[in-house]
Image: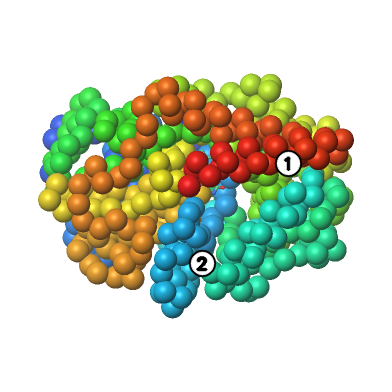
Amino acid sequence: MQYWRSISLWMDQLDDDLAPRPALSGSLEVDVAIIGAGYTGLWTAYYLKRQAPELKIAMVEAQFAGFGASGRNGGWLMGNLLGEDRALAPLPAEQRKTSFDLLHGIPDEVAEVLHREGIDCHYRKAGILYCAARYPEQEKRLREQLDGLHAEGLTDADYRWLTPAELNGQLRVANALGGIHTPHCATIQPAKLVRGLARTVERMGVQLFEQSPATHWQPGLVTTAQGQLKAHWVVPAIEGYAASLPPLGRYQLPVQSLLIATEPLSEAQWAEIGLEHGQAFSESSRQVTYGQRTADNRLAFGARGGYRFGGKLREDFQLSEEEIALRRYLLGELFPQLRNVRISHSWGGNLGMARRFRPHMLVDRKSGIALSGGYGGEGVGASNLGGRTLADLILGKESPLTRQPWVLGDGPLNRLSTWEPEPCRWLGYNAIIRSFVHEDRVLANPHSAPWRRAMALKLADLMEGLMR
Ligand SMILES: Cc1cc2nc3c(=O)[nH]c(=O)nc-3n(C[C@H](O)[C@H](O)[C@H](O)COP(=O)(O)OP(=O)(O)OC[C@H]3O[C@@H](n4cnc5c(N)ncnc54)[C@H](O)[C@@H]3O)c2cc1C
């Protein structure tokens, strides 16, 4: 269990002894079999049981509940969905507003469940601060993003520009040029959420088997080394691990995100930094950075990681010196006073990226398969929406949840876009990431010639275009 505790700061902080639940042995007949005990599987089980307590539900988990991204993430519980702008753009304004309201309501919905079920996961809803600080192009990019959001009908109540003075009132980063605040996000302690959910669904009667990797699945059947689940419905909920269980790997690319956390900082240090209400923060770079002030006063800070050839999963998240150094550098640029602070934890995890770079929820009634995923690193809130939506789809309920553009409706799995074969995936993904790192390096250097800045930006724009 010592290894399990070491997978993230969050697991290390738990009082939970992480004693393993029993493994599946023998054959069991259930209504719904769920593969994977992360947020997606657990939220699906939760909302199914809430609406239909008589359902027999069993879950098999390869390691233990929360072993995946759900026990390792940055703890941003966002009221949005990756690619929502593209998904919602074609809708009439009124319908788009309904969809935005649904997304923005995710943190409040989670808060309600936490309250109802007595789960304490350090939930604080103080929104996100997206800041521009390291180079002027960041300000331009953020202002364009804000214009785009407002053009979709969102208002200052959803996304508001902050002058440098206003940003400094909440977060004091070096050389602040301005930023955006959105209230639609809470921060949480991820492992406490996933472990709390696991206990909750068990209390509701869900059978959860740990150390039981599914070795094979097909409609109506999930097989493990020592047992099997026969089920009317199968819900594969393995997100970044899809590559390990055919045929899911065709639809989801496993990419990594990596974090560091400082030792607890003093009150004086926090007085210099801010974030007194637990706001999440990010700096506007295509390296996708994210941070939060933890309940025990550390600064947890992450950035996008790599992709391995052939979709090979990364198992070992002992970060290399280079991986830690990049995160330390980015953190030190924002908070020069933290350049020499001790980093107490570093870790990472696998997440799933869909080929369309948009999440999806779908059901195949004929085969009895329901699936939600492709969150692309923004799955903490999205998985709650996914779980709620899958519950309605499985129960055959038409609801506002099932009428959203990210719900692909009834039909076979192979409607999902597939990733290109190797080496195209590896070359493509790495070219994109390298262009982002290059852009960041050139723009962050005040001595870079204007033509170099323009070239670096153009190249990264072009590469980002490939992701759309
Ligand atoms: C480092 C990191 C930081 C992130 N930060 C954020 C953030 O701040 N905000 C945000 O919104 N999103 C973030 N994400 C993404 C978010 O954490 C995920 O989208 C979300 O947790 C996915 O939940 P899930 O249940 O679908 O998958 P997971 O939590 O990955 O759960 C899948 C489970 O399936 C199990 N499994 C795998 N194979 C099998 C098998 N064969 N049989 C049985 N079980 C199996 C795994 O052990 C795992 O427990 C981050 C992700 C990472 C990795």
What is the x, y in percent for residue 467? 49, 43
Q: Residue at x 41, y 69 (%)?
A: 91
Callout 1 secondary element: helix
Label drawn at residue 104: 2
Q: Position of 221 compared to 252: left or right?
A: left
Point 20% across, 52% down: residue: 411
The one of 55 and 153 positioned closer to us in this rendering? 153
* Mark seen at residue 454: 1
Q: Residue furthest front?
A: 451
Q: CA distance from mark 2 to mark 1?
A: 36 Å
Judging depth in this view, the residue of 5 and 16 nearest the camera is 5
Q: Find ligand 1 in the image and state its quadrant.
A: top left
Q: Residues within 10 Å of mark 2 (few under 14, many from 20)?
A: many
Kind of residue sitting beneath label 1: Ala
Q: Are marks 2 and 1 in contact (CB under 8 Å)?
A: no
Name the image colouring. rainbow
The residue at 66%/33% (across/down) is 437
- Above or below 258: residue 146: below
Q: Position of residue 33 (x, y in %)?
A: 22, 45
Q: Position of residue 436 (x, y in %)?
A: 64, 36
Name which residue type carries label 2.
His
Secondary structure of the residue carrying numbered label 2? helix
Residue 311 position within the rendered picture, expressed as x and y whole percent measured from the top left: 41, 27
User: Which badge, 2 or 1, comes first in the chain's sequence?
Assistant: 2
